[in-house]
Image (cartoon, rainbow, N blue to C red):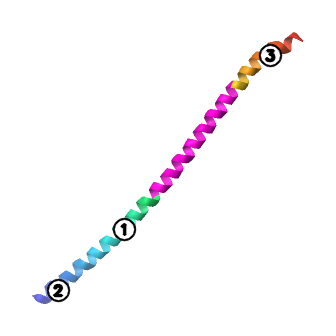
Amino acid sequence: MKEQLEQRLHELRTEFESGQKMLADLETQQANLKTTLLRISGAIQVLEELLSQSQESAESNSHALEVLEPLSHKE
């Protein structure tokens, strides 16, 4: 009986250690994924700002052409 209890105790400790290692690995993966998502989020923000500036610039250029176009016909 004592031998069976010691064997089971050993098995449970082994499982516990294995579970702790798996949990640590998952926490590392989670931290890495959070870092990756933060980088992607930053890249998205930069691209959105660039697109917004590009659109504003295009609209400004379009407006400038509308203003200048009548002047070019007067010459």
SS for tag 2? Answer: helix
Circle nearer the viewer, 2 or 1 = 1
Residue 36: give its label: none
Quarter where residue 66 is shown:
top right
The magenta-colored residue range is 33-59
| Residue that label 1 marks | 24
> Which comes before the other along the chain, label 2 or label 3?
2
What amino acid is found at the position of numbered circle 1 in the picture? Ala
Residue 47 drawn at (x, y percent): 60, 41
Give me the C-alpha separation between circle 3 and circle 1.
Answer: 67 Å
> Which comes before the other along the chain, label 3 or label 1?
1
Specify few, some or many for label 3: CA neighbours under 10 Å numbering under 14, 14-19, or 20 or more.
few
Q: Nearer the viewer, residue 15 or 70?
A: 70
Quarter where residue 74 is shown:
top right
Quarter where residue 61 is shown:
top right
What amino acid is found at the position of numbered circle 3 in the picture? Glu
Residue 42 drawn at (x, y percent): 54, 47
Q: Residue at x 41, y 59 (%)?
A: 30
Give me the C-alpha separation between circle 2 and circle 3.
Answer: 93 Å
Whether residue 60 sits left or right of residue 69 in the image: it is: left
Residue 40 drawn at (x, y percent): 53, 49
Residue 6: give its label: 2
| Residue that label 3 marks | 69
Q: Residue at x 27, y 79 (%)?
A: 14
